[in-house]
Amino acid sequence: MSASLNKQLATATVLWQLNGLYEPGNASAREQDMAWCRTEAQELATAYQGRVAALAAGELRELIQRLEMLDERLGRLESYAFLNFITQTGNAVASALLQQAEELAAELGRYTVFFRVEWNQLDAAAAARLLQAPEVAPYQHYLHTLRSQAPHQLSLKEEELLQELGPIGRSSWNLLFEKVMGQMRFGEQGRSEEEVLSDLYRSERSVRAQAAKDLTEGLRCHLHILTHIFNTLAQEKMILDRLRRYPSWISAMNLHNELRPETVEILVGTVCSNYSIVHRYYHMKRSLLDLETLYDYDRYAPLSQGGMQEESLISWTDCRELVLQAFADFSPDMAAIAQAFFEEDRIHAPLLPGKRGGAFAHPTVPSARPYILVNYTGRRQDVFTVAHELGHGVHQVLAAEQGLYNSETPLVLAETASVFAEMLVFKAMLARIDSLEQRRALLCQKLESIFATVFRQVAMNRFEKAMHEGRRNCGELSAEQLSSFWLESQKAMFADSVQLSENYRLWWAYIPHFLATPGYVYAYAFGELLVLALYARYERQGSGFATAYLQLLAAGGSADPYSLLAPFDVHLDDPAFWQEGLGLVEKLLQEAERTQGTTA
């Protein structure tokens, strides 16, 4: 089935070429880089360990530049190994290469961790003098961010031990998760996760119900493994948080995102207090579909004036044209950067056995170029996904000019670029539609996308909170306990507007964010609501906004989110700001309701 769909959509040959990182089959180049990395790491440790406090500003800059060059070379190796593996998760050679890269990273980290430890051990006055030196100016924010971790830093020996254990810690368990999910097959036809999830968007209710059943049964067959992975990684985080003296399960992520705890609490609280928007929408959708009860597998059913209609498939060529044109209407520069992904074979689009489901944009390293993975099934939602990942890609290309250490954008701003790109495509699609019925269908699809990005992600944040606190207070969690946490957090969002079935109880088990990046998911809500506010400014300001917006992306991680957003008059600790974004969601809902002939 996958092969025929790939042929129909013209995605069979849309495969990335990783020669931007290493030439195919050129193992000697990778081996040479690995050898250079080991030698350089050892030389840095020999030359500088124990001396950081005595370095002049110029010497400090030289050390940082060498460390950055080392991390850049290592990042190239890791990126190649990961991208080579993720499309063939059953390939033993690809898996071994990825493990080799992760072991190398741990080895190098053991040699170089001295810098972070010694820099953070400097007294405040000495650090302040160095930070003010012009020689260090390009790395000022990077060094300041390292200092913010000082209260949570362990001794040098302990940090070295954690580096040593890295390959058998979180990364190893995530690799197991990817292998399990990549090889899992669902239903009688033995389909992939992506194929089954795609059926939830089909018009036939029986097909949607069967897809939900197939997904659940596939997860249930591997539930003992998935539950063990979740528990192990929750326990690892519990131990590390305790050792590093983080006050709560979310503290490490907040610090990584350079956000004050109160900012995140205000965001999450404001979203939760607006769950009524979700309730209202799904009550409306139940009426439009003429259903007595709207089940979880009905949430993405396509809409038409008389009930349901099958969505026409969109070819890869049409998807490319639509997205690039929407980008070009906003900024020709943005479109040109995105177009290069297609022209330089930096996108992997078809459904293939062993390929991981979902989508992502991988930044690789500044000296190379980002790559994008999607599993394209031709649905309109897939077009938005392509736009989303290209938004990330554009951001990564622009931020690369900051260098490795200053290009790593906090997650909350990383999601801004992707969601803004989706909004551009949505507006372009909406402008082409005259039919009231089709306009309503697109409005509803956009609302569902926003719900998935804002309300669902905050509900998942509540699940994570329950999971991590439950693991700490109650010990090992059973699959049933995890399912109860999941259902409770989801019911708070849907209330009586959606009937959650027993099948839906297990759907926490396939979400990788909980494992790879604990606490990540609120970044989606942050990005979506920020984009809604920024897009409103764009509509008021016109073309001049694009320049300021691209400057924001190009700044990468060279400052914290509060500073980077200051030119846009954004106040992240003001509940009214987040309510402004939710108010725009409300307006979209009101417009959809008007097409139904009802009002709030």
Image: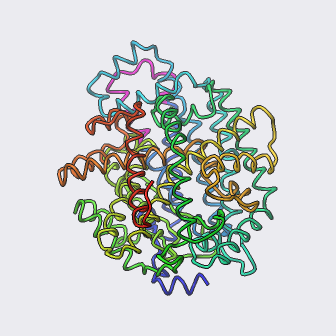
> Is residue 239 shown left or right of residue 315?
right
- Residue positioned 57% across, 31% down in the render: 251
In the rendered view, does 249 fall on the left or right side of 383? right
The magenta segment is: 47-68
Q: Residue at x 49, y 54 (%)?
A: 33
Looking at this view, is 127 or 323 the one in front? 323
**Residue 320, image x, y percentages:** 36, 74
Display colour scheme:
rainbow
Query: Is 257 displayed left or right of 339 in the figure?
Result: right
Q: In what quadrant of the picture does the N terminus appear?
A: bottom right
Q: Main secondary structure of the magenta part?
A: helix
Residue 339: image quadrant is bottom left
Res 210 → quadrant: bottom right
Task: Name which quarter of the figure residue 201 lies in.
Answer: bottom right
Q: How many discs appear?
A: 0
- The front one of 326 and 426 is 426
User: 319 or 493: nearer the eye?
Assistant: 493
Q: Is residue 159 above or below residue 396?
A: above
Front position in the image: 183 or 327: 327
Please state if 280 lies on the left or on the right of 576 as rendered.
right
Q: Position of residue 391 (x, y in %)?
A: 37, 58
Give how far across and how far down residue 295 sits, in percent. Answer: 66, 64
- Point 36% across, 64% down: residue: 426
Work out whether residue 389 can be spotted: no
One can see residue 341 in this view: yes
Q: In the figure, 573 relative to 333: above or below?
A: above
Residue 246 % position (x, y): 61, 26
Asked if the stretch drawn in magenta spans residue 347, the answer is no
